[in-house]
Amino acid sequence: MSSKQGNNRNRIKRLAIYSLLCSLCIVFGYVEFLIPTSLIAPGIKLGISNSIAILLLINGDIGGAFAVNISRILLSALLFGSPFSLLFSLCAGIVSTLVCALLIKLPALSPIGVSVAGGVCHNAVQVFVASFVVGRGVWFYLPILTVAGVICGAAIGFLGIVFSKKAKIDF
Amino acid sequence: MKILKKTDVILSISLILISVLGFFIVELMKKDGKTVVVKQNNSVVYEGKISEDREIPLKHNTVKIKDGKVFMKCADCKNQICVKSGKISKSGETVVCLPNRVIIEIE
Ligand SMILES: [Zn+2]
């Protein structure tokens, strides 16, 4: 097999795996959609899909983490969201993935710590965006959303580690 | 790979501590409010004293001021978070109806 052929095969494999992971995220998103966590405080979500991004980051695939996260946000907004909710989840998704991608390089933090930071950032960005839409009053939600971000983030980081041990993704 | 490192725990605890501390500081700084401001789509639709009992009907929501407290009496939004938010009376407190873009603020 020539190296060009090998390259193409690799790209197709990559595309297939990303698509598979993305559809898995959509399923996670639907499961979350069914759990009424937003009754505790507006905007609280488990963020199970982020465990896929953590899995890709553990594998050192930063581009893949962004590709899967952004496409799943766009797809789930199309399926169960509105342009309004897309604005929130896209801003929060991009910032939290960026934070995770930077922190995963730190040897002092495990994927759990990385995911905790990502979860807290995700919620903080949502409050920040909401403060422009509805007014600064929403900052009162930040403390409870931070606690939720730490708890959910830790669980999702752990899930990402479990996935990375069970599913060997190699390109 | 170690599953949980010391730094992870320190990071998590400090994030929670900062948020709880912030919450208490905000709670302690609260004062009884004087004015009720109701905004819809970021523009003020009502401004008045909190001491005057009244009902403010909006397109999709009804705001009620009674006994120095303000609350969302009813709303046609799906999640009903605004109605469940309860009564507010302190300066800086808010009730938000995100779906209908209605916000009640006390100043
Ligand atoms: Zn409402």
Image (cartoon, rainbow, N blue to C red):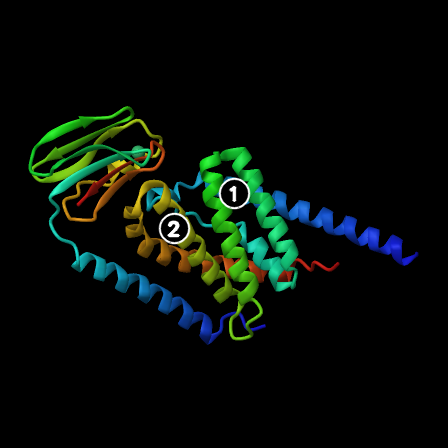
The residue under the point 88% across, 55% down is A4
Question: Number of labelled discs?
Answer: 2
- How far across and how far down the image is residue A95, in percent? 50, 55
The residue under the point 35% across, 31% down is B78
Q: Determine crowd level at label 1: few under 14, some 14-19, many 20+ residues with C-alpha closer than 10 A.
A: many
Nearest to N terminus: mark 2 or mark 1: 1
Q: Amino acid at mark 1?
A: Gly
Which residue bears the numbered disc 2? A128
Q: Quadrant of ligand 1?
A: top left
**Towards the viewer: B47 or A130:** B47
Q: Amino acid at mark 2?
A: Phe
The residue under the point 54% across, 39% down is A76
- How far across and how far down the image is residue A155, in percent? 47, 58
Instruction: Answer yes or no: is residue B4 visible.
Output: yes
Which residue bears the numbered disc 1? A29
Q: Chain of mark 2?
A: A
Q: Quadrant of the C terminus of chain A?
A: bottom right
Q: Quadrant of the N terminus of chain A?
A: bottom right
Query: Dividing the picture into quarters, in which one does residue B52 lie?
Result: top left
